[in-house]
Amino acid sequence: MFLGEIEEILDVIEPAQFAKIQEPLFRQIAKCVSSPHFQVAERALYYWNNEYILSLMEENNQVIMPIMFPALYRMSKEHWNQTIVTLVYNVLKTFMEMNSKLFDELTASYKAERQKEKKREKERDELWKRLGEMEISHKRQQAGAALAK
């Protein structure tokens, strides 16, 4: 219902007014696209079927694509509903056609960020493992000292 009402507003909004609201609006739409509830994600993804809204997005793709890309890429790999995955691929294809250079930059940036996250996670796991080993070593030393008394 909320997404339907927003679409009705977007159908009549002037481009200058759209530019003023695009960032908070598309941050919210990105959250909707990421929703595990398939109807919420589906309704948000249908915005790309609206020619007028799509023209507004195209005029402002430098702002909108970086906001939407992480959610879209993640959902293309992780969403449980195949219909949503298909819609996400269609939106990603639309973005690629809109601005292939920016799309390539966003893809590379997203993948690099995921690699950094994986590296940090691995380092964190190794740190916890070392802490566990130190704890075991400390307990052995305490037990040995107690036996020596």
Image (cartoon, rainbow, N blue to C red):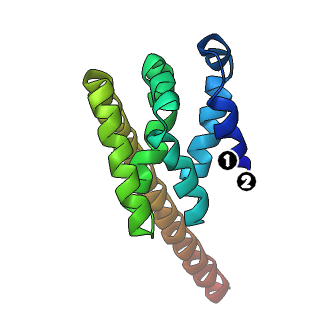
Pointer 1 and pointer 2: residues touching (CB < 8 Å)? yes
Q: Is residue 20 left or right of residue 114?
A: right
- Name the spot of residue 17 as percent of width and height, x first: 68, 15
Please, what secondary structure does the residue beneath circle 2 have?
A: loop
Most foreground residue, 106 or 20: 20
The amino acid pointed to by label 1 is Gly
Which residue matches tag 2? Answer: 1
Q: Residue furthest top?
A: 16
- Name the spot of residue 57 as percent of width and height, x first: 48, 26
Which residue matches tag 1? Answer: 4
Could you tell me which residue is drawn at 64 percent across and 39 percent down? 7
Most foreground residue, 149 or 65: 65
The amino acid pointed to by label 2 is Met
Could you tell me which residue is drawn at 60 percent across and 78 percent down? 139
- Name the spot of residue 140 as percent of width and height, x first: 55, 80
Could you tell me which residue is drawn at 52 percent across and 30 percent down? 53
Please, what secondary structure does the residue beneath circle 1 have?
A: helix
Mark 1 Cα shell of 10 Å, populated few (<14), some (14-19), many (≥20): few
Residue 39 image-quadrant placement: bottom right
Could you tell me which residue is drawn at 44 percent across and 69 percent down? 81
Q: Can you see residue 123?
A: no
Q: CA distance from mark 1 to mark 2?
A: 5 Å
Numbered mark located on residue 114 in the image: none
Mark 2 Cα shell of 10 Å, populated few (<14), some (14-19), many (≥20): few
Residue 82 image-quadrant placement: bottom left
